[in-house]
Image (cartoon, rainbow, N blue to C red):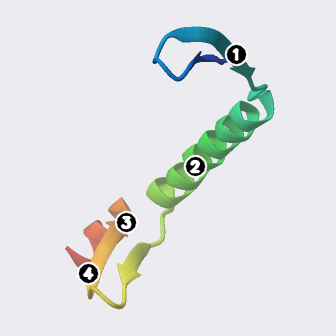
Amino acid sequence: MPIQFVPLSDETGQRTHWISVQRDITERKLAELALLKNQGRYRALFQENPLPMWVYDDEALDFLAVNDAACRQYG
């Protein structure tokens, strides 16, 4: 659990106290791990798909991603 220490000073600038803040980030870390796992599955499905697939940006008129099957079929 990350711990953050913040000094408190009086009007002269002398440190008088410290405040400690602790946050339980277990839930956030578990969500991050689940997201990474899902991203890995998506990438594998995208890359290993025998059918041509691509992600295209209509505004930029540019391909963002193209799988190997699309490269083989369209060059």
What distance separates the C-alpha of mark 2 from that of mark 1?
A: 36 Å
Q: Quadrant of the C terminus?
A: bottom left
At 27% from the left and 85% from the top, the residue drawn is: 60
| Residue 41 position in % (x across, y down) | 61, 48
Identify the element where label 3 is drawn.
helix
**Residue at the spot x=27%, y=68% of the render?**
71
**Residue 10 x, y percent position in the rendering:** 56, 19
Q: Earlier in the sequence, mark 3 or mark 2?
A: 2
- Label 1 Cα crowd, 10 Å radius (few <14 / some 14-19 / many 20+): few
Determine the CA span between mark 4 and mark 3.
Answer: 18 Å
Place residue 70 in its image quadrant. bottom left
Residue highlighted by disc 1: 20
- The label nearer to you, 4 versus 3, is 4
Task: Report whether 8 appears left or right of 72.
Answer: right
Q: Secondary structure at mark 2?
A: helix
Q: Earlier in the sequence, mark 2 or mark 1?
A: 1
The tally of labels here is 4
| Residue 51 on image: x %, y % | 48, 71
Eye-nearest disc, 2 or 1: 1
Amino acid under label 2? Gln
User: Where is mark 3, residue-wise?
Assistant: 69
Residue 73 position within the rendered picture, expressed as x and y whole percent measured from the top left: 30, 75
Cα gap from disc 1 to disc 3, whole angstroms: 54 Å
Circle nearer the viewer, 1 or 3: 1
Per the image, the residue denoted by label 4 is 62
Viewer-side residue, 3 vs 74: 3
Q: Amino acid at mark 1?
A: Ser
* Residue at the spot of label 2: 39
